[in-house]
Image (cartoon, rainbow, N blue to C red):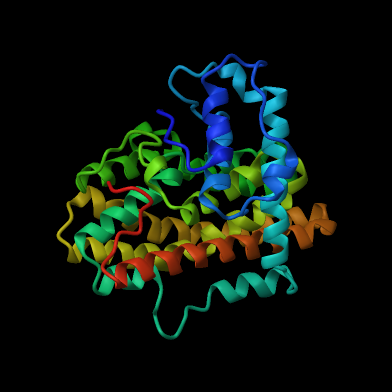
Amino acid sequence: MKRPPARGDLSAAVVSALEQSPGTAHLPDSRTAAASDPYGDDLQLALALCYELHYRGFDAVPDTWEWDPELLRFRAALEHAFLVALRADAPASEDVDTLLDGLLVEPADGGGVSHFLRDRGEHWQMREYVAQRSLYHLKEADPHLWVVPRLWGQAKAGMMAVEYDEFGAGRAERVHARLYADLMADLGLDSAYGHYLGACPRQMLAVNNLMSLFGLHRAHRGALVGHFAWVEVTSSPGSRRLAQALERLGAGPAAVHFYAEHVEADAAHEQVVRHQVVKGLLREEPALAPDVAFGIAATGLLEDRLGAHLLSAWQADESSLFAPL
C-alpha cells in the first residue's frame, strides 16, 4: 500500500515519520491534536495512517513502526480527541435493545444513500460509493476479529460463526473481501488494497477509523460489539437496494453478486449477533451495556454524516470524493 498525500500538519507529521527509521521521529504533542477538528481531514487521515500499520502496512515502511512508542503516544492523542467528540455528539441514552429495535425501522421518506442509488443514481456515483467502501470491504471482518480474544462463551461462539462466513467458510474464492474486489473490477475500479485511501473524504475515513479504534483497545470491546451489531442489523435491506441499483445500471454478475450475497447472509447474521453476541456479552459482563449502546450510537452518527455528505454532493451533481478517481 502506498502512502497518500498529507492533508495538514498532523497527517504530514505521520507521513514524514514513516519515511524515517522507527525510534527517531518526533511527533506533535497532545495539545496539537486536541486543537484540531476531530472529524477533519487532517486528523482522520493521520489516524488512518497509524491504523493501517496494524493491517498490511505501507510500501518501504518497516513493520516495527506498528508498535513504535512515539507513534503510539501520538495516536493516543488523536484517538482521545476523536472519542471526546463522539461521546459529546452520540450520547447513548437508550438501552441496547431499544437502540437495536430502532435500526430495524427504515425512514418513511426512503431518503438514504442506497435508496438514491437504487432509484436514480448514476454509474459514476455508484463507482464513487464502491471506491469509498473499499476501505473497509477489502479487509472485511478484520477489524472485528480484534474483539474475539476479549469475549467468552456464547458471545465468542456467535462472533466466530459470523466471521467464519465473512472469511468464506474455508474457501478462498468466497472470502467477502475477494467478492468485493471482483465487484470493483466489474465497475472498472482498482481493487488493490487501500488504493482509494487518498481519495476518500473525512466522513468515510471516520467511519473506517471507528472500528479500528474500538477493535485495538480491550477497553472498547463493548463498543466494538455495538458497532458490529449496527453493521449486521442494517446490512440486509441496504444490500438488497444496492444489488437492485447495480442491476438497473447494467453492472456485471460479479458486481451484483456481492450485495445479493449479503441480503441473505446478513439477515441470518443479524439474529446471531443480537441473540448470541450482544446478549452473550451482556450476560457475562452486564456493566458493558452503556459501551455497547455507545458503539451503536457512534456508528449511526458517523454513517449518517457520511450519507448526508454523499447525497449533498450527488444532488448538486458534484463528486463526493476528496480527490478524483
At x 41%, y 73%, the residue is: 112
Q: Quadrant of the N terminus?
A: top left
- Residue 97 placement: quadrant: bottom right
Can residue 165 be seen at all in this image of the molecule?
yes
At x 24%, y 73%, the residue is: 120
* Residue 203, horizontal then vertical, whole percent: 49, 56
* Closer to the camera in the image, 57 or 314: 314
Q: Is residue 62 above or below residue 4?
A: above
* Closer to the camera in the image, 18 or 240: 18
* Closer to the camera in the image, 307 or 244: 307
* Closer to the camera in the image, 211 or 86: 86
* Residue 64, horizontal then vertical, whole percent: 61, 17
Total labels drawn: 0
Q: Residue lying farthest right?
A: 287
Q: Is residue 60 above or below residue 165?
A: above
At x 55%, y 28%, the residue is: 53
Q: Residue lying farthest left?
A: 250
Q: Is residue 321 above or below residue 54?
A: below
At x 43%, y 64%, the residue is: 236
Can residue 154 be seen at all in this image of the molecule?
no
* Residue 272, horizontal then vertical, whole percent: 58, 57
Q: In this view, does 92 lie above or below 61?
A: below
* Residue 98, horizontal then vertical, whole percent: 68, 75
